Image (spheres, rainbow, N blue to C red):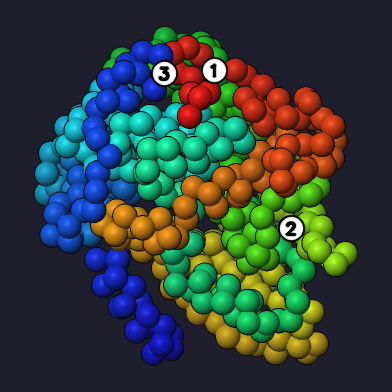
Amino acid sequence: MSRSVRVNRRQFMVNSGKIGLGAAAIASAAPAKGVVGANERIRLAVCGLHNRGFDHVRLFPEIPNVAVAAVCDVDENVLRQRLAQMEKRNLPKPKTYTDVRKLLEDRSIDAVCVATPNHWHALIAIWACQAGKDVYVEKPCSHNWWESRQLIRAAQRYNRLVQHGTQARSSLSANEAIQHLRKGLIGEVYLARGLCLKRRRSIGHAPVTPVPPGVHYDLWTGPAPAHPFTRNRFHYNWHWFWAYGNGDLGNQGVHQVDLARWGLGVGFPNKVTATGGHFVYDDDQQTPNTLNCAFQYDLPGGKRKMIEFEVRHGITNREADIGTEKLGSGNEGHTIVGDLFYGSDGYLELGDEDTGNAYQFWLGSNLKAGPHAHEGGTRYHFANFIKALRSRKKEDLHAPIEEAHISCTLVHLANASYRLGRTLNFDPGKQEVIGDEEANRLLRDADRGYRKPFCIPEDI
């Protein structure tokens, strides 16, 4: 690693040092806060502890004057497990909740971290804004296009800071690679290719069973339609059901979609096509385990750019160095996740966030090895959120909700194209599919509606 990268890393760490039931209580729970002093403790609440949420519990307290003061999970078994783990780590015992609405009434909480299943992300984030709390919402920030648009409105109306969990935006190496692209290192960049090639096992078929003791299943279901309990509709496997998740495109893939869009310097696309299916396995999964997507951008002057994206759950080859020990997991092809950028004078390989967004440039017609680096990102992104809470400057956020909304819209458009079996022509100005009401309905409510009282507010 170059000395300049090491210095930047040190500097970076120093600088980072309602509606329905309970609506009135949430909306009036806390006033909008002002600037948090540099020596004041920021009190966070983490919602959803089964998987990613426990990273929030572990890592946020590493930042000076930050405490996880409350945790919330609808599974009391998970709550007990995480509390025991926090005790072993000598972390202060937090308040505990199973109903997020009760948590949001706590005036002592400054910000809420949302790491629940996708179908809850936007609703909790909007409720938190209404309660005068800032938000760190995990990816994807919405289950459909309309939710993240409403979340933007809530953040603006209630003057709240909302950070999205696309942590590569805070990765030193990813930022360095993008700057090389901006400076023209590989000439005119016209194509980005995102890869989400992760070996996934079949989830099988799960019968209806009684709800496990300690699980508040009605709260878990929340805005989604009510279904009988099965293990496949619960911990993690919910990703593969349209009522709760967005498939691997919205699970792992949203990271790479965001990087592709960031690297190309583009926003909403003009045309989207996605095709694929659920191959090989015979199981309960609804979302595709193989998916090919194309996003076309029509630019001024008659130029075009393009993003290609691929999801693959089965055995796969590597692409370039992504998936090797150099730019990936080195796990014999089980995980090939990252982005490739193609320019008129070379290309860039950019690894995923779990490997620090390591990158390698290849230059000229002879593809001579160019700049490369390897740095981390997750802790930086948490620190960036805290920095913004203290400054109260939205421009300090590396992944503000407005950028998140655009990247997540790409996910929702591709899923809609796949489900409808046709190409979608999108109007970036109006943010709607041209001449296709069925597609716009999918973008509006994912064709499932909202279960009262867990509804996204209409009038924000």
Q: Residue 19 has which mark? A: 3
Q: Amino acid at mark 2?
A: Ile
Q: Which residue does the image show at 60% across and 17% down from the upper left? A: 449
The residue singled out by tag 2 in the image is 307
Q: Is residue 145 visible?
A: yes
Circle nearer the viewer, 1 or 2: 1
Relative to residue 18, is residue 319 drawn left or right?
A: right
Q: Which residue does the image show at 20% across and 49% down from the upper left? A: 42
Q: Residues within 10 Å of mark 1 (few under 14, many from 20)?
A: some
The residue singled out by tag 1 in the image is 450
The answer to which quarter of the image holds residue 43 is: top left
Look at the picture and state if 117 lies above or below 159: above
Kindly check if marks 1 and 3 are in contact, taking CB atoms under 8 A apart as contact: no
Image location of residue 403, percent across then percent down: 55, 52
Q: Which residue does the image show at 51% across and 71% down from the upper left? A: 175
Element on which disc 2 rests: strand
Circle nearer the viewer, 1 or 3: 3
Relative to residue 108, is residue 391 drawn left or right?
A: right
Image location of residue 363, percent across then percent down: 71, 86
- Marks 2 and 3, how far apart at CA: 38 Å
Circle nearer the viewer, 2 or 3: 3
Q: Residues within 10 Å of mark 3 (few under 14, many from 20)?
A: some
Q: Residues within 10 Å of mark 2 (few under 14, many from 20)?
A: many
Closest to the observer, 460 or 204? 460
Q: Amino acid at mark 1?
A: Tyr
Image location of residue 312, percent across then percent down: 68, 48
